[in-house]
Image: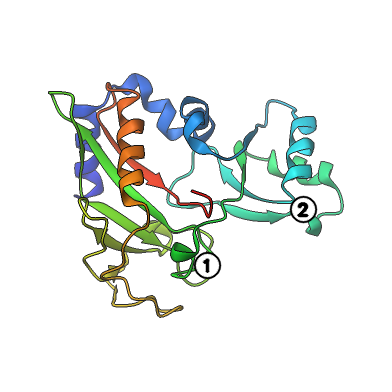
Amino acid sequence: MTNYGRLSVYGKLNDYRYHHVFVNKYQTYLYYSPFFKREVVPIMRESDNFTEFESFIKRHSKFIYKPLSGSCGRGVRLIDTGAYPSMQDLYISLRAEDGVVEELIIQDERLSRFHPSSVNTVRMPTVITKKGEVVILSAVFRVGQRNRIVDNGGAGGILANIDPVTGIVYTNGADEFGNTYVKHPQTGVVFRGFQIPRWDEAVSLAKDLASLNPRVRYVGWDLALRADG
């Protein structure tokens, strides 16, 4: 489906009153916080929560920064506080735009071996039918490359289709520039035939997420598998 077609489907299936939940990362966190399993703190230009930020970095000396409304991995940064002599100055620099800081995800080794620099995720689109059934559409395995920290297709990531019943990758990888890959160009790990670990749990999680708001009937969920589940 093209991006234009996808937006058309959004308009037909989704209640626009919930649009802000999916375009504002902190609103997403607040709405779905029981599912996040990691700490998230907002960094806003119009509010001063340095004390909260300072408490966060005491627990997480390395963290991810994301622009509040960005997409395709743009503006996402890995920050090591050891490289900054002043936490106040770091906080001020981050407040130049609205964003969030997030606890790092330590991913399952079986996913990490494809490309250790990025958290490699499953994009799982769900649709709620008129009868209220949650249907899993064709899922996609997303993997970063060239030591980038994001796996987004728009940032050069490699995508491969997953059988939604078995959780097995059944295609070679491809990027959005027309290149195809039997195996990852940096690590040599083969895409086709890879079994996504704990697949049934991923499907169950996506259905739970989708069911939380039946007025938003079409969503593409990005799921990460941590080392501890």
Name which quarter of the figure residue 158 lies in.
Answer: bottom left
Above or below: residue 27 compared with residue 102:
above
Which residue position is annotated with label 2? 81
Name which quarter of the figure residue 210 lies in.
Answer: top left
Q: Is residue 214 left or right of residue 107?
A: left
Front-lying residue, 40 or 19: 40
Above or below: residue 130 compared with residue 60:
above
Residue sitting at x 36%, y 32%: 209
Residue sitting at x 50%, y 28%: 27
Residue 165 placement (x, y as % from top left) = 20, 51
Residue 106 placement (x, y as % from top left) = 57, 55
Amino acid of disc 1: Pro
**Which mark, residue 116?**
1
Per the model, the C-alpha gap separating discs 2 and 1 is 21 Å
Q: Is residue 224 left or right of residue 141?
A: right
Front-lying residue, 192 or 144: 192
Residue 6 placement (x, y as % from top left) = 23, 42
Find numbered disc 1 in the image and state the secondary structure of the residue it sits on: loop
Amino acid of disc 2: Thr
Find numbered disc 2 in the image and state the secondary structure of the residue it sits on: helix
Question: Which is nearer the N-term, disc 2 or disc 1?
Answer: 2
